[in-house]
Amino acid sequence: MEPNTKGAATFYQYKLIKKINISASLLRVYIALPFVFLVLETVFLSWLSILFMIIAGPVMLWIQYVISRSVLLISGHPIVKRWKMSLHLPWPGYMPDQYINYGIFRKVQMHNLWIGLCITALFIVWAPPAFTASLVICHLWLLLPRLYTLLRLRSEAKDGMLKFNPSDASYYAQ
């Protein structure tokens, strides 16, 4: 008997290796961080830091979007229907919508971290120090949950798959 290749579905078998939960207390700390830094920035730099922080949030979201999309396009990875812009905590920003290869995700986030910091460093010359500090704070705050995930997965094999859910990140092996 010949196998039915026409219309046959492909099944992927993934084995859960590690689940990284974002607890409610950790989420509260994450939400409080920008307010703590805003108070510190207002006290030590300028009262205009409130305005600068409001501006820096969307600017950093856009910069990270451009960096992530550029890295994915340059490296030749498909992004249509696989990545989306999310404003839901704890995963704000341009995030994978489906299973994503750990190596690709790590590559995108490391480029995001370093290129984003370099871009904010360029603002030192032209912008007030409070605005540059706001950009750095927003940049690191947006990346913090993803960097936390990468830090927790540093000992795992790089060929696994990641899946992001509203309150956790799951690492699977094929």
Image (cartoon, rainbow, N blue to C red):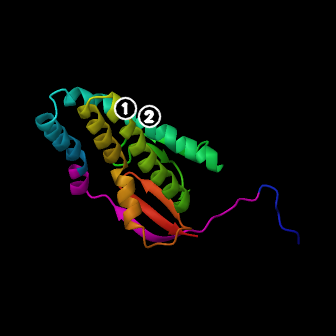
For the C terminus, the quadrant is: bottom right
Q: State left or right for residue 9 relative to residue 145.
A: right
For the N terminus, the quadrant is: bottom right
- Mark 1 closeness class: few <14, some 14–19, many ≥20 residues within 10 Å: some
**Residue sitting farthest toward the front:** 125
Q: State left or right for residue 49 relative to residue 7.
A: left
Residue 67: horizontal and vertical position, in percent? 50, 42
Range shown magenta: 8-29
Q: Amino acid at mark 1?
A: Pro
Looking at the image, which residue is at 51% across and 51% down? 108
Residue 139: horizontal and vertical position, in percent? 35, 43
Residue 173: horizontal and vertical position, in percent? 54, 70
Image position of 134 with respect to 107: above or below: above
Instruction: State which quadrant residue 164 falls in.
Output: bottom left
Q: State left or right for residue 151 relative to residue 76.
A: left
Looking at the image, which residue is at 33% across and 52% down? 144
Instruction: List the residue tagged with mark 2.
Output: 62
Numbered tag placed on residue 58 in the rendering: 1
Q: How many marks?
A: 2
Can residue 78 be seen here? Answer: no
Tell me, yes or no, whether the highlighted magenta stretch contains residue 118.
no
Camera-side residue of 27 and 119: 119
